[in-house]
Amino acid sequence: MFRILHQIFRTGIVTEPLAPGEEARVTLTGRRLEEAILRRFRQSLTIRLVDAGSCNACELEIQAVNNPFYDAERFGIHFTASPRFADMLLVTGPVARNMEVALKRTYDAISEPKLVVAIGDCAYDAGAFGPGYATRRSVADVVPVDAFIHGCPPAPSAILAGILKAVGREG
Amino acid sequence: MKKNAMSLRDALIEALGADAAPNAGQYPASVPLFEAPKARFAEAAAVLKAREARLVAEWATDETPFGRGFGVWALYNAGDEYLTVKCGVPYDAPEFPSLTKTYLGAWRFERRMQSLMGVEPAGHPDTRPWIKHEDWPKDAFPLRKSFDGETYLQRVEGDYRWVRAEGEGVYEIPVGPVHAGIIEPGHFRFQAVGEDIINLEERLGYVHKGIEKRFESLSWTDGARLAGRVSGDTTVAHAMGYCQALEAAAGCAAPPRAQWIRALLLERERIANHIGDIGAISNDAAFTFLLYQTAILRERMLRTNKTLFGHRLTMDMVVPGGVAVDVSAGAASAIQDELASVSGEFERLVRICEDNPSLEDRVYGAGTLSAALAKEMGVVGLVARASGQNLDARVQYPTPPYADIIPAVPRLRSGDVHARVWVRVEEVRDSIRIIREILRYLPSGPLVTGCPAPRPGAMGISVVEGWRGEIIWWLQAGPKSEINRAMARDPSMVTWLALEQAIKGNIVPDFPLCNKSFNQSYSGNDL
Ligand code: SF4
């Protein structure tokens, strides 16, 4: 136990402000954000992730937003296991054919109002995988998307900034 | 003389005689290729198995562009010897003898070949499709040349037959494909009595993106970028595998400096993933403290990558003929400084782990994969080493600099979660040592060399030890020097199967911990 306390002391607080140089490249789509969404999200934001065919690198960078450097929790952002409690659906991947039904079901299970943010270049336009027999052209072909966060993969700071932008708050 | 002292090559020639015809079209020549009649394909497997060979990979090719039918291929390894056996299969009678009687690992390779290429493994006990889900048209075989890879497949009605266990008190728990955490999708079906798991059946393929088919529409150069996205957490190793196979087929070699820089990136990838895994496994054993500490170390390394190489995960740094980044003197000293601090912190965390009895309780004896089973199933990489197997492609198939800087290959015998954590700990230490030596002796010279396209029909093979384990790439040029076939064998393709076995007899709540200790790739498996 002593060693743990010592380590905590050594580590100190590493959280940092989002660096201005790491501004996210985000495409906001035409979906109008309702006032109700904004009001609801002001307290906290609960997110459900669906990997719809990513290469798994986007997952690594989404995991990283929870690390002590980015500490997504300080913005009230939580990841949830259950779609029913989610405000936002994060989607990665070009939508693999074998995930299309599961993605739609998860979307349907989230109650309104809900936001959809698609993460990574391949979620935007199938990226490196291209559209094909087993991939859609974009997540937007399967569920309505409010914002795309670009990058392959986008850095954690870009993911965090993109999420905040999508709900209309400033990072 | 020991029975297995004879090389695989000699054993094959002794058994098959003139029926084992050498084919000089596969490079490097150190991995020989023999063509055998279809009728003796399974016999060849049995002969090699008797020489302690492991089935490394099995795959199929559509060779109609050459005016032939299908090819069915098996790659074997024993010690430092790799060897390929091919048999031709007629287009209008697409059937070959299954190797499942000899090799358990052939089970999923052949289901995949059947599903995606439409070649039937005769005698295979499980004819259900794999990767291809029940709502695909039955006659859709994407890897056939006649299949249109650009058009989205329509959906049909269908049904998947799960393995059923019956008996008093047996109940079923289906999980997935979408999981609770920030992880990839897959479906697990447990049969349990009380809390005890009596059977686990995995169903994967959810993130199948048609990667192998897509290669056939790309240039050789563009292929490297896609190879780096087969499994994003293994981007360096897969890009290396692709480029080395391409360079072998094309008859060119990356300059020494480039090969050493590739190894440096590969070892950095190993450290970052292992450190992240050690934290995530501890977290599943209810020791959250370590998750945050290891996440900090991992994040530091990714930031160094960004500063020095321009990308946090060092994607697209390995290119055909060399590398796209240099390591300047300044970068070298920045890496030395970073390693000194990461290494110091890491050792402190390891001592905390060792001090923590609650952690030890959870990881000892959980998810045990016996040495015998690991060998039987052809498991590779850190999972194999935690179950006593002496396997490391950096030693068995060394490319520069690993002939000079020899990896330590830590091994444990117990095959449990603890052993898989501990192999990672030792490998982090050894990779730090390897990187320091690379920086000390880094050869000077160019970073990239021009590579021609492989000649028509040329084939190239590579073996790379990624952080999960041995990765195989096999490339075949078509009649116009285009990519006719790109085959990637991620360690996950063999090791997922072993998780089904290791979990038997464990309790349901321990599954996440055991699964995390294997940490196999869904994307790398599903392609
Ligand atoms: S955007 Fe890039 S990094 Fe993210 S999942 Fe797609 S291919 Fe992988």
Image: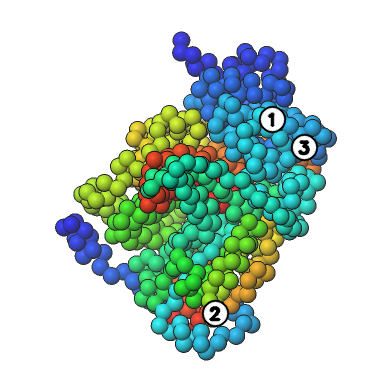
Total count of labels:
3
Residue farthest bottom in this picture: A35
Placement of A111 over or under B167, stated as above or below: below
Q: Quadrant of the N terminus of chain A?
A: bottom left
Q: Which residue is mark 3?
A: B63
Percent across and percent down for residue B39 are: 71, 22
Residue farthest left in this picture: A2
Q: Nearer the viewer, residue B87 or A112?
A: A112
Mark 2 crowd level (few <14, some 14–19, many ≥20, 10 Å Cα): few
Residue farthest top in this picture: B1
- Name the amino acid, label 1: Ala
- The residue under the point 25% across, 68% down is A12
3D distance between C-alphas at marks 3 and 1: 20 Å
Q: Secondary structure at mark 2?
A: loop
* Image quadrant where residue B49 sits: top right
Q: Which residue is mark 1?
A: B122
Mark 1 crowd level (few <14, some 14–19, many ≥20, 10 Å Cα): some
Mark 3 crowd level (few <14, some 14–19, many ≥20, 10 Å Cα): many
Percent across and percent down for residue B60 are: 69, 37
> Under 8 Å from ligand 1: the CB of mark 1?
no
> Under 8 Å from ligand 1: the CB of mark 3?
no
- Name the amino acid, label 3: Glu
Of mark 3 and mark 1, the one earlier in the sequence is 3
Q: Nearer the viewer, residue B409 or A90?
A: A90
Report in which chain the residue with disc 2 lies.
A
Q: Nearer the viewer, residue B266 or B226?
A: B226
Q: Which residue is mark 2?
A: A112
- The residue under the point 53% across, 19% down is B50
